[in-house]
Amino acid sequence: MNNTTKQDKIAGLEQQVQDILNAIAELKKEEVVPAKVEQYRNWKWKPEIGEYYFFVGSTGTVCEWEFTDCATEDGFYSLGNMFQKREQAESEVKARNIVAQLWRCEGARGFVVGGYNWTFEARYSILDYTCWTDTILQYTFPYFDSEDQVQQAIQQVGEQNIIDCILWLSQGKVF
């Protein structure tokens, strides 16, 4: 076999390997995306008329009420403030408090287009919290000007509190 034929064969095999790796990556991506879509499709729960549900009241207390399908309840539902279990509503209250604490941390600000935006992504990617790509988290959590400010926020609010909040907002895991 001459050198050119051998190099062509190697190049062809390398291309086949790359094609296989790309196909595997696409299949893995397809497995994850439908699960996330299904997760968000079931995120909001709406009771039947006469069934009891929980919601977070204006003062942050968890309330239980009988569903009557009125305009106020339409508002609760559209805002995602209607829960089947008390523990879910309590997790919502905790998450709101954690997010409020984060926004009170030094340097907390909104996303700056074209700017350098530090947030919890870098910190939690090492813990495999890949949920940060979820839009709700991107618009809920503050950004900071430096990694030091992120570390200060973690110390002030508590690492486990932030992790629990992320898991509640992205996956509905009560805490």
Image (spheres, rainbow, N blue to C red):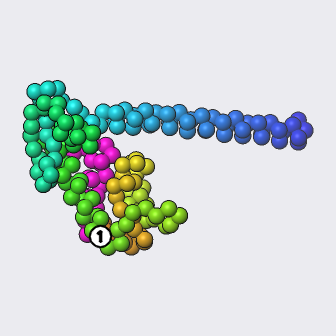
Instruction: Please tell me whether mark 1 sits on a helix, a strand or a loop.
Output: loop
* Residue 49, x across and y down, in percent: 14, 26
Q: On the picture, is 94 further left or further right than 22? A: left
Q: Position of residue 169 (x, y in %)?
A: 30, 48
Placement of the N terminus among the 4 image quadrants = top right
Locate residue 152, reporting x and y percent.
32, 72
Q: Which residues are magenta?
A: 156-175
Residue at 33 percent of width and 55 percent of height: 140
Q: Is residue 65 visible?
A: yes
Name the main secondary structure of what is drawn in magenta. helix
Front in this rendered view, residue 171 or 40: 40
Would residue 59 be found to the left or right of residue 3 on screen?
Answer: left
Residue 144, compared with residue 55, is above or below; it is below
All told, the count of numbered labels is 1
Q: What residue type is disc 1 on?
A: Cys
Residue count near mark 1 (Cα–Cα under 10 Å), binned few <14, some 14–19, many ≥20: some
Q: Residue at x 37, y 54 (%)?
A: 139
**Is residue 79 shown above or below 96?**
above
Look at mark 1 in the image and give the residue it sits on: 105
Give the vertical position of 108 relative to 12 (above or below).
below
Q: Is residue 83 visible?
A: no
Residue in view at x 45 percent, y 36 percent: 33
What residue is rendered at 39% in x and 73% in y? 148
Q: Residue furthest front?
A: 71
Residue 92 x %, y %: 21, 49
Viewed as shown, does residue 123 lie left or right of 157?
Answer: right
Q: Is residue 99 magenta?
A: no
Of residues 74 and 107, the one nearer the viewer is 74
